[in-house]
Amino acid sequence: MSKIRDQLHHLRPSAGPKDWPLQVVARTSWSRQRPTYRDAQPAIIEGALRRSQRKPTGNWYAFAASREVRPGRPFGATVAGVEVVAWRDEQGRLCVGPRTCPHLGADLATGAVRRGTLICRWHGLALDGRCREFGWSPLPGHDDGTLAWVRLDDVGGEAPLPEPVIPDRPAGDTLAAVARVEGVCEPADVIANRLDPWHGAWFHPYSFTRLDVITTPTEEADHFLVAVTFRMGRLGVPVIAEFSCPQARTIVMRIVDGEGTGSVVETHATPVGSGADGRPRTAVLEATVAHSDRPGFQRATRVAPLIAPLMRHAAARLWRDDIAYAERRYQLRAGGARP
């Protein structure tokens, strides 16, 4: 950790208050950055990806932000080719089940929720989300407060887990937001994108600068440590971040030193199914859970409804770029382009 502290000390501004987290980012030509292609060795990325794909998921799939499944209305989604519907019961608990009505096949996402019961609009079949009706059976669901999950044992094919593998999140006052982007690729392509931190300052110069990969993953220490400055126009916040995969379809960036220590960005890659062209679609659900010990942060949490859309916009902007990376990776692997 002494190397990490030395790196962070080098990145912090030399002027201003000791605890001031911001620094002015010098204007630098994009093309005059230090090239990182020699460091971004394919063997390192592929090795980290192989290890990540061996980690169990317990057949759990993140399919929506918790806030999207609202009381009083159903929410429909497609996960790994399976149509599901979700809603809240009278206690606000998450209910999930097949989206097709067992009577005559109506889309239950177009139904109505009354007193926590889902009612089909075609003929009034009522489903409470706990019991079997006409062969319709509820699916295991989980709401972690930020994301809604469904367990699909027939699809996942792994030993089921009682709850999804959720990384540790910061305690205390937090700001959370979930962004969603969909692309023509497979979940592993999304994870591979995040297992290449070297592309950050080149592909996203509007968000990252002064990026230096301190350590790369090994069998014993399967994570990246990265020194990076997050950009906000001409200002920047230098931090040390750790990238790791708690399960096969999730990669987490955690700030381990610097402003916002403990904050996480969880990138969840959820297969949607095949499109009309037969190619796979994957949804990226990126959950940002920010934390700070600064007194002003507590005040910021009081206006979370105003800040969360800005957080979602920033994440979606990054993923509009990164989904092209993931799609290109899939295209090359599927033989749609020459390397």
Image (cartoon, rainbow, N blue to C red):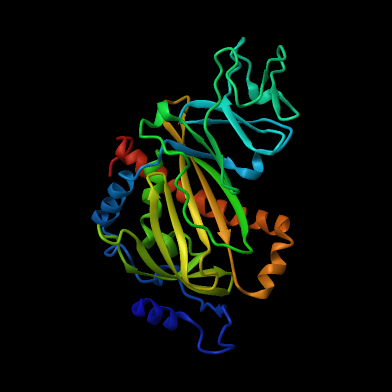
- The residue drawn where x is 61% and y is 64% is 172
Which residue of the protein is positioned furthest toward the top in this rendering?
Answer: 104
- The residue drawn where x is 56% and y is 25% is 138
Q: Quadrant of residue 221?
A: bottom left
Which residue of the protein is positioned furthest toward the bottom in this rendering?
Answer: 15
Quadrant containing the N terminus in the rendered view: bottom left
* Residue 21, image x, y percentages: 56, 78
* Residue 278 located left or right of residue 320: left
Q: Nearer the viewer, residue 92 or 108?
A: 92
* Residue 251, image x, y percentages: 42, 52
- The residue drawn where x is 33% and y is 35% is 336
* Residue 81, image x, y percentages: 47, 27
* Residue 275 located left or right of residue 197: right
Quadrant containing the C terminus in the rendered view: top left
Q: Quadrant of residue 111?
A: top right
- The residue drawn where x is 56% and y is 56% is 288
* Residue 58, image x, y percentages: 40, 38
Q: Is residue 264 above or below residue 329?
A: below
Q: Nearer the viewer, residue 293 or 226?
A: 293
Q: Is residue 34 above or below residue 94?
A: below
Q: How many marks?
A: 0
* Residue 96 located left or right of residue 295: left
